[in-house]
């Protein structure tokens, strides 16, 4: 069983910063990609940023230049550094992984979500 556990959400003022972390655990053989999605009230879930096992990154246009995704393969952890936060960044942020696990094969996994609120 593969689990993704996020941490680091919270309340921050506009212009502030937060760092999200997501740790993958379980019978993991290989991690092909990990990323962050977010869902604001009344909106669809959207991709924020993704990093592949080859360190290729992809960002939503709305966060380019403000957010940075990085990973530590040895720790099976992905990070999202969020700077210059705006009220429109308020959402539940979900960790996502495309992971090859023992006896299961390749599947997509989701974390439970962490709330990020940007407000003065």
Image (tube, helix red, strand yellow):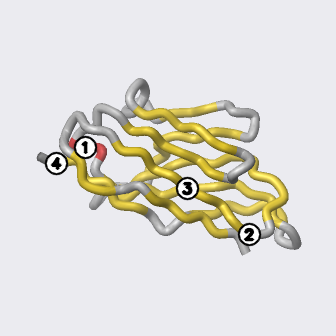
Q: Which circle's residue, 2 or 4, is located before the other in the chain?
A: 2
Q: Residues within 10 Å of mark 1 (few under 14, many from 20)?
A: few
Q: Which residue is mark 2?
A: 26
Residue 22 circle label? 3
Q: Quadrant of the N terminus?
A: bottom right
- At 32% across and 39% down in the image, what residue appears? 17
Residue lying farthest to the left in this orientation? 120
Q: Secondary structure at mark 1?
A: helix
Q: CA distance from mark 1 to mark 4?
A: 9 Å
Q: Which residue is mark 1?
A: 88
Q: Secondary structure at mark 3?
A: strand
Q: Quadrant of residue 22?
A: bottom right
- At 83% across and 71% down in the image, what residue appears? 104
Residue 119 circle label? 4
Q: Which circle's residue, 1 or 4, is located before the other in the chain?
A: 1
Mark 3 or mark 1, whichever is nearer to me: 3
Residue 63 in picture, x, y percent from top left: 39, 33
Q: Residues within 10 Å of mark 3 (few under 14, many from 20)?
A: many
């Amino acid at each position: 069983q593969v689990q993704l556990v996020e941490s680091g959400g919270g309340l921050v003022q506009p212009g502030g910063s937060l760092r999200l972390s997501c740790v993958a655990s379980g019978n993991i053989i290989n991690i092909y990609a990990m990323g962050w999605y977010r869902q604001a009230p009344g909106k669809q879930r959207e991709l924020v940023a993704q990093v592949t096992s080859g360190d290729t990154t992809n960002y939503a246009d709305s966060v380019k230049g403000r957010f940075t995704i990085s990973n530590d393969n040895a720790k099976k952890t992905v990070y999202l550094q969020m700077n210059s936060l705006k009220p429109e960044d308020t959402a539940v942020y979900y960790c996502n992984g495309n992971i090859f696990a023992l006896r299961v094969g390749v599947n997509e996994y989701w974390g439970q979500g962490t709330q990020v609120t940007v407000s003065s």
